[in-house]
Image (tube, rainbow, N blue to C red):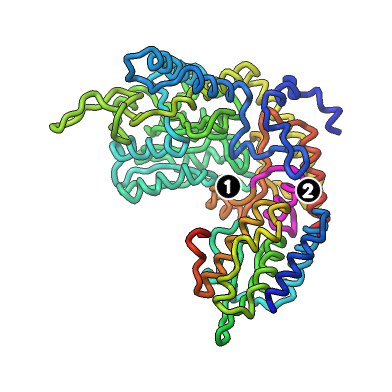
Amino acid sequence: MADTLKNSTAYDVDAVRRDFPILSEKVYGKPLVFLDSGASAQKPRQVIDAMSACMQRQYSNVHRGAHYMSAATTDEHEKARETVQKFLNAEHSEEIIFTANVTMSINLVAHAYGRAFLKAGDEVIISEMEHHANIVPWQMLAEATGVVLKIAPIEDDGSFLLEKFAALLTERTKLVAITHCSNVLGTRVPAKELIRLAHDAGAKVLIDGAQGIVHGPVDVRDLDVDFYGFTAHKLYGPSGLGILYGKLDLLESMPPFLGGGEMIDKVSFAGTTFAKPPFRFEAGTPAIVETIGLMAAIDYVTDIGHDAIKAHEQSLLDYATERLSAVDGVRLIGTAPDKAAIVSFLVDGHHPLDIATILDRQGVACRVGHHCAEPLMDRLGVIGTVRASFAMYNTLAEVDVLAEAIEKAKRMLS
Amino acid sequence: MARAEYEEFAETLDALDDEDMRFEYILDLAKAQDREDFPEEWKTEANLMHGCMSRVWIVHDKDGQTHHFKGQSEAAIVKGLVHMMTRTFSGLTADEIAGFSVDDVKRLNLGALTFQRQVGMMAMLKHIQKLAGRAPAANEA
């Protein structure tokens, strides 16, 4: 079945796979079928080589050296910022802040924007399908300031209920923090419409793009989003590096989040003045090698074509949905009409951990558990799921391996 | 006595060189565990072993100097491992329980089964040693 669909992809997937050294590894003597890219994606040779070249041939701390290596490394580091700016279609490179991960990007907004501009009784809206990273910072803000947290509901199939979200908007709503794409269900949130509605109500919007930006192009100006967070390691780049996009006027109005070196204008014991964005929010030495790795990852994604990747992943999603639905006892969790290639499922009568363990033995790497979304598990009435999350390098044949591995797990556990 | 049972688990797992058969052996142990009495009211928060990917309950009792354990899990493979651990340690003194080491768990070669299971077994060993009043040695914590 997969063979007949092989040419439906938008680019040469086999050539892409050759760029990812780890994909030719074996686990337990079996070819690795990596379906856990939603947790962290594998890295192409181009990223590995760029980071290696940086450390081997051109490395120094940035923004401070009066020597060639520092100037050259600073140029590359800032070029990475401009690469992210273009990738997001942001207006200014100063709108791109390097953080450690999306969690830190969201915490930055909750802390620097939330504590400066939100007060007791103001409302923040999140949704039922948020990752803990987009729940806990707002709970902490609520605890500290008296801000009220409102939860936008989802449909049983995982669809985002835009009308019910709109009904939550009031003159007290000051901030909306919603995922672009659910890490468990794959549901895409209609971000542009949501942002328009929130703006009409006078609220700012933060979009958690950890999954969203991986599975399709993002244009922050077209979205008119106020803050957009994502992470390098899910976008085929290195771990340890997150991004926060923020509209420049908002960033300029915000106090710093962390204090230290790099983020200051002038320091004396009488007082300190802070640098302008983005440096105001980048205390300490940044993840220098990682920004250069992210630049290579973005170049790689751009070369393949973000739309082409989206099209390929759609074919993977369609085939996985069809193939897994045909396996007796498999229940897909999350079947919204508009979703990315993330397939959560359960097998009747079997604990997801047992299924995932037997898949693992067959070389199929899936994630199992609550996926850092315990409130969503409660909403869906499940203890957890097995999650197959696809990436640009996965093949239709790997979907077959997954389906056959589930059949085998069922046989062994029955 | 219980040590002999542990030897049997280890030798059986060692003798089974086919991975599917090793899984099936552990699943058989899970079925044996299901035949043991474990009332629903024992599945309390207090009996939960935290940090597991599936819920595991361990009930501990003491008869003179010897300790007794019963356990249950939602997941079949974990349940098989719970069977091995509760059988191994029931009827032993705290000192005997403390005498088990991470190396004993490694001997089961569960890492060949899946790495996660070996890590889970080590966590279970430490949990049982803690219940028996013998915290694991610092270098194993």
Q: Residues within 10 Å of mark 1 (few under 14, many from 20)?
A: some
SS at circle 1: loop
- Observer-nearest of A17 and A112: A17
Distance of label 1 from label 2 (alpha carbons): 20 Å
Q: Chain of mark 1?
A: A
- Observer-nearest of B95 and A141: B95
Left or right relative to A293: residue A69: left
SS at circle 2: helix
- Image height check: is A291 above or below A178? above
Q: Amino acid at mark 2?
A: Ile
In the image, residue A357 lies in the stretch drawn in magenta: yes
- Image height check: is A316 above or below A144? above
What residue do we see at 52% from left, 37% from top? A179
What residue do we see at 50% from left, 20% from top? A54
Q: Which residues are magenta?
A: A347-367
Does residue A15 appear anywhere in the picture? Answer: yes
Q: Amino acid at mark 1?
A: His
The residue that disc 2 covers is A406
Q: Position of residue A9 (x, y in %)?
A: 75, 23
The residue that disc 1 covers is A371
Q: Position of residue A314 (x, y in %)?
A: 70, 30
- Observer-nearest of A82 and A111: A82
Q: Position of residue A162 (x, y in %)?
A: 53, 38
In the image, residue B63 lies in the stretch drawn in magenta: no
